[in-house]
């Protein structure tokens, strides 16, 4: 027993020595201090957001007339006569519609601008917005020739605005451009089957029979479908007439035959009379310079102050996130669209 206790004593002393050399853990910061740190971080984030917002506002405020700025693209930088590039990119919808309209207005008022290159890379968008742009282009072409240059895509509403060039305008498309998709769509979600499974009953309080005609939690009645078919047909007929009025080699019946919602690659679009030439930006600019008769010309592009969404995420990403967030919320709101639905994504609405 004495030998065993003697052997254990050094171990006990060694253990006591280890405990003596270990430093105690510091006490956690008081709760009030942790909340102070979190509050400062939140204030810092808010400050960053506000400063970015003020920066975007500052740029927009000090742009002449709130309109677009000019950026040199190509040609003779010191030439007085100009060709202006008006770009229509992405989904045609607010707030981008207003930017396009401001560019058209700027080109219309600038006497040094002798011609317009309408650059389109869009799957389409809202019916009203597409027609607003088309209407302003019709006014612009009365004094200045317009040549259209289609990039990756000019479908549905993207093709609709291209008609702003008129019968005398020339439409170029790249060899890989997709165009067409002529038609109208009203997005609608049918969740009636899901609602039945989970026991959801839609019972809106409304003042008229058709006030909730696009309710996603029930099927459309025959009367409701007839009304929306009429609305769709009205926009569809306008689309057909706009193309007929502005494509000199196509009559109404030919346009209607093409307007099935089908997409056309550039070669097929040219064969069917939807475009005039297959080429690139330099080809479109050369034709426009030939039309205007200018030897020396400064080609400029209109640019716009970046919004807060542009600064934080970039236009495309901000739009894409907003689209997904708003899609279900807006599913009961009727929005007629000239849009290429084959893309699988519907644009968000404002």
Image: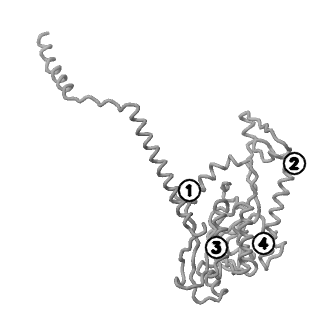
Which badge, 2 or 3, comes first in the chain's sequence?
A: 3
Q: Residue at x 32, y 29 (%)?
A: 27
Residue 44 vertical placement versus 285 (above, below):
above
Q: Nearer the viewer, mark 4 or mark 1?
A: 1
Which badge, 4 or 1, comes first in the chain's sequence?
A: 4
Q: Nearer the viewer, mark 1 or mark 2?
A: 1
Residue 220: x %, y % from top left: 82, 46
Please, what secondary structure does the residue beneath circle 3 have? helix
Q: Which mark is residue 222?
A: 2
Q: Nearer the viewer, mark 3 or mark 1?
A: 3
Q: Which mark is residue 243?
A: 4
Q: Residue at x 69, y 69 (%)?
A: 179
- Residue 9 shown left or right of residue 139 in the figure: left
Q: Which mark is residue 106?
A: 3
Please, what secondary structure does the residue beneath circle 1 have? helix
Mark 4 crowd level (few <14, some 14–19, many ≥20, 10 Å Cα): many
Look at mark 1 in the image and give the residue it sits on.
Answer: 309
CA gap, disc 2 and disc 3: 48 Å
Q: Which mark is residue 198?
A: none
Please, what secondary structure does the residue beneath circle 4 have? helix
Are the two marked residues, 2 and 4, in contact with CB atoms closer than 8 angstroms? no
- Residue 131 shown left or right of residue 173 in the figure: right
Residue 284 vertical placement versus 332 (above, below):
below
């Amino acid at each position: 027993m004495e030998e065993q206790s003697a052997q254990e004593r050094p171990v006990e002393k060694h253990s006591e020595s280890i405990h003596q050399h270990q430093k105690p853990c510091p006490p956690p910061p008081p709760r009030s201090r942790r909340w102070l740190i979190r509050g400062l971080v939140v204030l810092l984030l808010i400050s960053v957001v506000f400063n970015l917002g003020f920066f975007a506002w500052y740029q927009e405020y000090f742009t002449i007339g709130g309109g677009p700025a000019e950026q040199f693209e190509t040609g003779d930088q010191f030439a007085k006569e100009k060709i202006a590039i008006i770009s229509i990119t992405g989904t045609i919808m607010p707030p981008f519609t207003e930017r396009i309209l401001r560019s058209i207005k700027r080109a219309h008022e600038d006497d040094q601008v002798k011609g317009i290159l309408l650059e389109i890379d869009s799957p389409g968008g809202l019916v009203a917005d597409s027609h607003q742009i088309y209407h302003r282009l019709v006014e612009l072409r009365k004094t200045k020739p317009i040549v259209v240059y289609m990039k990756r895509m000019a479908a549905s509403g993207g093709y609709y605005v291209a008609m702003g060039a008129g019968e005398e305008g020339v439409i170029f498309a790249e060899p890989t451009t997709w165009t067409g998709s002529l038609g109208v769509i009203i997005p609608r979600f049918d969740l009636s089957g899901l609602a039945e499974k989970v026991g959801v009953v839609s019972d809106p309080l409304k003042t008229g029979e058709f006030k909730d005609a696009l309710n996603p939690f029930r099927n459309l009645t025959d009367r409701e479908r007839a009304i929306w078919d009429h609305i769709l047909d009205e926009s569809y007929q306008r689309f057909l007439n706009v193309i007929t009025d502005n494509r000199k080699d196509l009559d109404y019946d030919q346009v209607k035959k093409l307007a099935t919602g089908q997409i056309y690659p550039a070669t097929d679009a040219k064969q069917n009379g939807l475009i005039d030439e297959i080429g690139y930006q330099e080809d479109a600019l050369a034709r426009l310079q030939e039309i205007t008769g200018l030897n020396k010309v400064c080609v400029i592009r209109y640019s716009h102050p970046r919004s807060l969404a542009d600064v934080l995420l970039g236009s495309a990403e901000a739009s894409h996130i907003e689209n997904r967030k708003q899609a279900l919320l807006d599913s009961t709101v009727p929005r007629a669209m000239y849009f290429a639905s084959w893309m699988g994504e519907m644009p968000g609405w404002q």
